[in-house]
Amino acid sequence: MTEQANNEQPPGGGNGPTEDGGTASQTPLTGHPTAGRTAGLTLLLGALGVVYGDIGTSPLYALKTVFTLDRNLNPNTHDVFGVISLIFWTITLIVSIKYVIFILRADNDGEGGVMALAALAQRALRNAGGRRATAVLGLGALGAALFYGDSVITPAISVLSAIEGLEVSSPELAVVVLPIAGVILTLLFAFQRWGTGRVGTIFGPIMVLWFACLGVAGAAEVLRHPSILAGLSPTYAVLFIVHHPLIAFIAMGAVVLAITGAEALYADMGHFGRAPIRRAWFAIVFPALTLNYLGQGALILRAPDSRANPFFLLVPHWAQLPMVILATVATVIASQAVISGAFSVSREAMRLGFLPHLRIRQTSHREYGQIYSPGVNWSLFAAVLLVVFAFGSSTKLAAAYGVAVTGTFLITTTLVLVVARARWRWSTRRVVLFGVVFGSIELIFFTANLAKVSHGGWLTLLIAIVLFTILVTWRRGAALVTPRRTEREGPLADFIDALHAADIPRVPGTAVFPHPNKDTTPLALRANVAHNHVRHERIVLITGRTANVPHIPWDQRLTIDDLGDPNDGIIHITAVFGFQDPTDFPEVLRHAASHPLASGINLDQVSYFVSRITLRCTPHPGMAIWRKRLFIGLAHNAASHVEFLHLPEERTIVLSAEVPV
């Protein structure tokens, strides 16, 4: 399996401020492979197995938390109908209408997530001034940071809530909940390396069974008490809010748990495409969730004590243990939704210049969006495991949940309004209507969840603050370093003219310099000439680009430029790779050797020179000293391009140059 590069340039060009990787901006030769494609059974099952795991397991804890969060809620008709109505219409408005119908339209070359949306909004505002575009990207970075906070809490609360079902049938098993959760989470994160495609194929049929059980369990109770169907009327939600405003406000802090997977749904769009996600939602997920919440509500009316854990008490006693097992598997799948979403958001952050180069592996031969990032995966694993053992129960974690989710909802709504107005050409009236309806609902949810900050909500905010600081620091640092690096590189044309004028001696062999463009001079080339006072007979600059298609034939992959002089031995090669093609620069050279401009290259006498700069912290203005040190630390831990470009270590030379920050 090959790695997928970070192929977007940070501000000012280059593949990052510290290393010439030879890769430049992504080249969308065609549309996203799944765009407009009829969703087949495989993709639909995959979407069920990855995308809907999070929101699909919310019945485990959402209604239980509503009734345990506020003891003033009574298991009477008005309160239960009011809560059920709130949950149903929250899911309908936020998930079905906002996300599934509208937000999924906002894809960035097939990718979803708040960073992809921010990139679309930035492009839409290019003619409206730099400050607005910068503010939009800042919102995207904040949304991504909040999503990472959600990605830490979701696996922890989902797995814990399922395993705690053991306590319902056998209270003495409470002591094994945390160890079992630790083992399951370890296996989940270890399995990520196989890719979301395989995960979805395995998990899809299980999720079909899960949603079938949700629907059947709920429908059985609804048939016993069909009056609960009245809870689908929005009238009960309105009356509940009007008659008990304070109780309803507190309850909304827990109602939001029913829609916590909505942002992951959007972030995972690149893994399966919009059509399978929409069809799976309306055909399977939405009906099953609705039936189960109705069934739980009917059960609470019939047996008020069941509000302690209405999900597991909804099934017969003999089925509780099998349901615990199925729920555990389903919550593992729920965790998959935010984990794969975190991979997608991370790649978008790299493409927008908010993160250094991370190792990204392509895990599908067909789908560009199916990726795996080892660094993101194991960082999440460490954070999730720490949270599980620190909080110890899903009830305590529920208090920490919601702040990051609702904050991301508000940011997504803001960004989609920008896209709708500037890109989709919505009328002002339509934009205002959308903003008022969804923005006001999400603002209420966000405000209701602020009360949780002192009860654990600080955790997701702390994670978001730390990650937001990292994102904006890397982007700011790259903005400071890139112009200084570009200045040191200088124009390539001027350097070649200087070589000709100085009549530098030539030595046998070919020197290859990976470089993200053909406008500036690789620092390694400058250093080689300056220190050795010689140049190679053949000098080859290679720039790699990645297209949104799986494979590109070799006869369409290479473009060779003599840079104005076919006789000076200096050429530039542009290589366009499919996302499933290995970015193998030695192989590029082998195929280019048959071209007339590359004739004379002896493949046995090739040396590769990679430019890397050493950052030096200075008191110069532009960024605080502690942020400069953070930026330098991030740069030192960025993934090397030597492995990614398949350069032979025994013939690769890394030349460094110092640049002040």
Image (cartoon, helix red, strand yellow):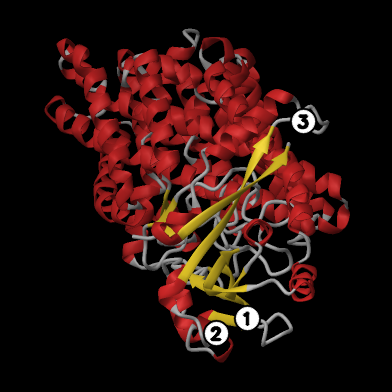
Q: Secondary structure at mark 2?
A: helix
Label 2 and label 3: CA atoms lie apart by 45 Å
Disc 1 secondary structure class:
loop
Contact check, label 2 and label 3, Cβ < 8 Å: no
Q: Which residue is mark 1?
A: 569
- Left or right position of 171 against 377: left
Above or below — where is 202 with respect to 443?
A: below
Q: How far apart are the alpha carbons under marks 3 and 1?
A: 43 Å
User: Which residue corresponds to mark 3?
Assistant: 623
Mark 2 crowdedness (10 Å alpha carbons): few <14, some 14-19, many ≥20: many
Amino acid type shown at disc 3: Met
User: Where does the image place residue 345, in percent across and percent down from the top left?
Assistant: 54, 46
Residue drawn at (39%, 27%), measured in percent from left and top?
A: 382
- Which quadrant of the view contains residue 440? top right
Per the rendering, the mark at residue 159 is: none
Depth order, front residue of 462/61: 462
State the SS at label 3.
loop
Nearer to us in this view, 623 or 384 = 623
Q: Which image quarter is the N terminus in? A: bottom left
